[in-house]
Amino acid sequence: MLKIQTTHHADNGLTVALIGTIGREYLGELEDVVGRAARDRQRLSFDLSQVRLVDREAVGFLASAMERGARLAGCPAYLREWLRLESRCSPAAASERRRTCV
């Protein structure tokens, strides 16, 4: 189960706190969040500090979101490593992932 909490900031930022397990069944809803943030030109950040488990599709979604400018805050160590291992991008993209997943 995944709980999604959004917080809008005065500086045009949007933080999306994800709580629980991120599975493929939630990716459509999360894709909508990313799309709305892009449409509204908001700086998007996912707070992953309360994420307990992710599946492979969720890792792919998070990697794609980072490539589109989203920041991952509170990223668990296992997830940072998985994103690194799953990366099939150039070394420059892998470097960008290290900077945006903290």
Image (tube, rainbow, N blue to C red):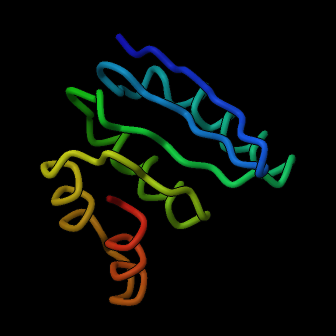
How many numbered marks have been drawn onto this rendered protein structure? 0
Q: Is residue 80 left or right of residue 32?
A: left
The foreground one among 51 and 7 is 7
Image-based side of 40 in relation to 90, left or right? right
- Residue 24 spot, x, y in % from top left: 41, 28
The single residue placed furthest to the top in the displayed view is: 1
Quadrant for residue 56, please give it.
top left
Above or below, comparing residue 72 to residue 56 in the picture: below
Q: Give whichever of 99, 59 is nearer the camera.
A: 99
Instruction: Estimate the x, y position of residue 52 in percent, counting from the top left.
Output: 21, 26
| Residue at image location 62% in from the left, 38% down from the top | 31
Q: Say left or right for 79 vs 101.
A: left
Quadrant of the drawing holding the N terminus: top left
Furthest-front residue in this view: 10
- For this orientation, the residue located farthest to the right is 40
Whole-percent x and y of residue 96? 42, 78
Quadrant in which residue 33 is drawn: top right
Q: Which part of the image, by quadrant, shows the C terminus?
A: bottom left
Give the percent coordinates (x, y) of residue 42: 76, 51
Image quadrant assignment for residue 84: bottom left
Residue 71 versus residue 94: which sits nearer the camera?
71
Seen in the picture, residue 4 relative to 95 is either above or below; the reply is above
- Give the residue at x 43% y 27%: 18
Residue at the spot 71% in from the left edge and 40% down from the top edge = 9
Q: Residue at x 39, y 51 (%)?
A: 60
